[in-house]
Image: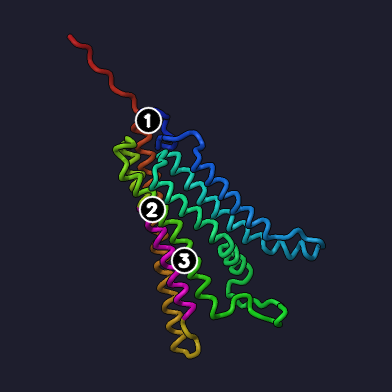
Amino acid sequence: MLLDKLMHHDPVDGFRWRSHEITRVEGFSDAVFGFAVTLLIVSLEVPKTSAELFETMHGFGAFVATFIILAGIWYAQFTFFRRYGLEDRVTVLLNLVLLFTVLFFVYPLKFLFGVLLSDPLMRQKIVTAHGLVPVVPIEHRPWIFFIFAIGFMSVFTVFTLLYWHAYRQRETLGLNEFEVWETRHSLRRMSLSVLVGVMYFGVAFMHSLPRKTAADRMKVEIVSWTILVFFFAIFAIIFRMLRQRLRVRKEWKARQAEPVPESPPQA
């Protein structure tokens, strides 16, 4: 039984791990994440001259940013499987959707970071066989952020569904008081992250607005400030939740460290 097999592990950072071995699901996931990182690397050809080397290094920042995001997704998935040890059909299906999303959005993610880090205003041009053309034409900008929004939302929607599924299995898994609270906290945190992805649809909408007249530019400015305020509000809530999480975890661990009072001897 799952409960008999997994419930006697020591707590890890306040949350007991119900899986210590690499399962087939995790092994396959690690292979996919490794392949995703390989896609980022092989997209950079080995330079033949020092000039090509310096040109290649311009893409290093985009590689680092994308790698950090992939590493964060991998660690979040790793933590989930270690905490709950679920391998049922729903968990496997959601995990496959997560892996598909990671593979599909690796290149768009790296491209977006490459553009934003080297040219935040997206005005850079490049020489092609057709002459000097923009790296990101104006009509393509909304679609770039639209694609990013879909990828961002998809990843955190999957994590939200995974934690919701684990929360529904709380009695079967034997979650204690803190573990139930932590699961609900993770569920709320992932849901807020989905809202961050929704805000990128607003960014895509902003880039689709006309900017020919002063009234048009005023609308763009109003939309941009509205999006910025919502971003700050969401991140402020997430930051406050993380502080609450640290406090609750510290209190729980302190309670667990308290000695159990001995029973008085019977007369």
Mark 2 closeness class: few <14, some 14–19, many ≥20 residues within 10 Å: many
x%, y% of residue 235? 42, 60
Q: Element type at marker 2?
A: helix
Query: Residue sitting at 34 percent across and 49 percent down?
Result: 164
- The three-letter amino acid code for the residue at tag 2 is Thr
Report how far apart the C-alphas of labels 1 and 3 lie in the structure: 39 Å
**In this picture, residue 134 sits left or right of residue 145:** right
Mark earlier in primary sequence (2, 1): 1
Mark earlier in primary sequence (1, 3): 1
x%, y% of residue 134? 63, 79
Question: Is 195 included in the stretch rendered in magenta?
Answer: yes
Where does the N terminus fall, quadrant-wise?
top left
Q: Residue furthest left?
A: 267
Query: Residue sitting at 64 percent across and 76 percent down?
Result: 124
Write down the quadrant of residue 66 in the picture: bottom right
Q: Residue furthest bottom?
A: 213
Question: Is 63 included in the stretch rendered in magenta?
Answer: no
The dot on residue 160 is 2
Q: Which residue is mark 3?
A: 149
Of the pair 49 and 266, the residue shown nearer to us = 49
The dot on residue 7 is 1
- The three-letter amino acid code for the residue at tag 1 is Met
- The three-letter amino acid code for the residue at tag 3 is Ala
Relative to 183, is 156 above or below? below
Q: Main secondary structure of the magenta part?
A: helix
Q: Element type at marker 1?
A: loop
Query: Residue sitting at 45 percent across and 49 percent down?
Result: 95
The segment highlighted magenta reads 188-208
Mark earlier in primary sequence (2, 3): 3
Relative to 42, is 83 above or below? above
